[in-house]
Image (spheres, helix red, strand yellow):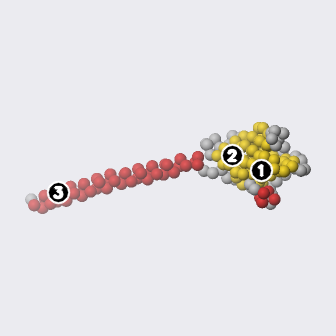
Amino acid sequence: MKYIIIFVSALLLVACKKDKEATSGSAVSDSVQIAHDSANVKNSSEKILVETFAFPAEIKECSCYFARNKADFENEKYIYADDAGKTAYMKLDGKRLAMNLISSSDMEADEVLTKEIENEDYKISVKGKKIKGEEALLFEGTLTIEKPDGTVETTPIYGECGC
């Protein structure tokens, strides 16, 4: 009889430990799943990759083209180019894009340049102020890119418009 009581007690003790391990094990996998799910929500905070490119062969006459700064401009590392009000060219997130310009200012008011470009993936605005004017007009300003998910990237620009 004594052996039966010890055997039943041991059996109950082992059974209770297995229940606790199963309960705590499932809680760990749930929290791991939650952490994994929250990592997937991070897409909207990713940066927009703005890459440099050579001057587009499609542009034959008057144009505006900008780099991030004067040094990049002098080394022909452009991040934006357009053919005087029709088509804008950029390389965003690894893709070379040719997009239609929606609006472009005539630069008569306060010597300010503004351009608006939009497609299904990006909304781009260029704002610049004339810093020097000879044959071509030099500008400094900002280029702002927005995605539908709310991601915004703003970068300084330096470049020129002319024929």
Q: Residue, x 36% and y 54% (percent of image)?
A: 25
Left or right for 41, reference 62: left
At label 1, the amino acid type is Glu
Q: Nearer the viewer, mark 3 or mark 1?
A: 1
Q: Position of residue 54 (x, y in %)?
A: 80, 56
Label 3 vs label 2: CA separation? 71 Å
Q: Position of residue 86 (x, y in %)?
A: 82, 41
| Figure quadrant of the N terminus | bottom left
Q: Position of residue 145 (x, y in %)?
A: 69, 46
Q: Secondary structure at mark 2?
A: strand
Residue type at mark 2? Ile
User: Which of the marked residues, 3 or 1, is nearer the chain's N terminus?
Assistant: 3
In this rendering, would 76 be left or right of 36? right
Residue wearing tag 2: 145
**What's the mark number on residue 8?**
3
Q: Amino acid at mark 3?
A: Val
User: Dot 1 surroundings within 10 Å: few (below 14), some, or many (20 or more)?
Assistant: many
Q: Quadrant of residue 114?
A: top right
Determine which of the numbered discs, if any, sits on residue 36 in the image.
none
Q: Residue furthest front?
A: 110
156 or 12: nearer the viewer: 156
Badge 1 or badge 2: first in the primary sequence: 1
Which residue lies at the image location 72% right of the left edge and 43% below the top edge?
A: 125
Query: At 49% from the left edge and 48% from the top edge, which residue is drawn?
Result: 37
Cα distance between the residues tagged 1 and 2: 17 Å
Residue 85 visible in this rendered orientation of the protein: no
| Residue identified by numbered label 1 | 140
**Nearest the eye: 126 or 50:** 126
